[in-house]
Image (tube, rainbow, N blue to C red):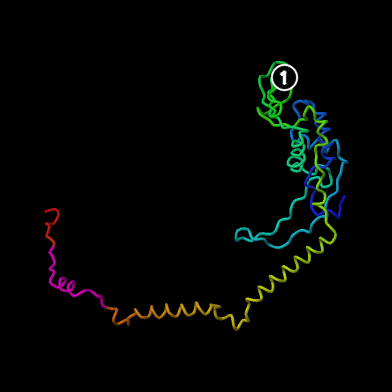
Amino acid sequence: MINQQLKTWVNFSTPEARNIVRKILASAPHRELGLRTHEIYERAHEEFPDVTTDIPPGKPTPTGLRNHGGRYKPVKAVPLPPKLDHAIRSVKYLKKTILEEMAMAREIEKVHIRRGKLYEDGTRDISVVSKAYGKTEITSDLDMPTSNIWRWRLTPDYETKIINYPKPPIEKILWKPGEKESRRKARGSVGSVLLQQTKKYEKPTEETGKSDVPTGLEANNDVVLQQTKKYERPIEETGKLHIPEGIKADNNVAKRVEAPSFPAFGH
């Protein structure tokens, strides 16, 4: 159900979502081994398809281009959750929010399961490691395609932990009276200020033909140009090499050493 008062998605676990997870883990085929995240998600929508929650109104699809490191690409719309109005709307929401908060309340825990020896009757030794309760060795017929897996399970005293949740911060995701209008005005004022600042540095076309260089920089450029011209010489004078007199005299009296004459090959 669309709730016009919501300004964002619910970013905390709700009692409805926690109750779904609690019931699914309590009815797991191997309760001491729990279930994986995607298994909880699939069973939630198969067994509790009608448990819904409020959702915020959809945002308009963005248009235009966006700068990606100097390259402009079309703006991509943010993908919506797979199950919009369900109490567990996505795997990410289940994994990062619901399960993490239930683990912080010590209602559930994440355990590491390692498979061991397989017997003829189809059972195998399994090692279960829990941070709170240590290592446990059991024999089970659990199908384990991989040697190591992580699973979520209920804690032995989870029923006493159900109340270990703070009050939902619902006020953070609700629009306050007049908040939408104030945000629109703020965006409009910022846009007008930026536009005025941009026009402040604009000049008519006939004036912008010259580079807008500050007066101090123009003076410095003139001084540098004068100093450069000071050391320039006419083209007819620079045609000769400026060689010291002593070096010239030595070059005039130098004699070439004739190369020795070698007999022709084959003689």
Q: Quadrant of residue 16?
A: top right
Q: Residue at x 68, y 62 (%)?
A: 65
- State yes or no: residue 246 in magenta: yes
Front in this rendered view, residue 11 or 56: 11
Q: Which residue is mark 1?
A: 139
Q: Quadrant of residue 241?
A: bottom left
Q: Secondary structure at mark 1?
A: strand
Q: In the figure, is residue 151 to the left or right of 160?
A: left
Classify residue 68 as left or right of residue 62.
left
**Magenta stretch holds residue 209:** no
Q: Position of residue 134 (x, y in %)?
A: 69, 25
Packing grade of label 1 (10 A; few <14, some 14-19, many >=20) is some
Q: Position of residue 193 (x, y in %)?
A: 70, 71
Q: Horizontally, is 251 left or right of 234 in the view?
A: left
Residue 226, position as x, y percentages in the image: 40, 81
Q: Residue flagged by tag 1: what amino acid is it?
A: Thr
Residues shaded magenta: 240-258
Residue furthest top as drawn:
120
Q: Provide residue 174's location: percent of width, then percent of height.
A: 83, 53
Q: Is residue 69 above or below residue 110?
A: below
Residue 7 against residue 119 in the figure, above or below:
below
Q: Nearer the viewer, residue 184 or 44?
A: 184
Look at the picture and state if 267 lies above or below 103: below
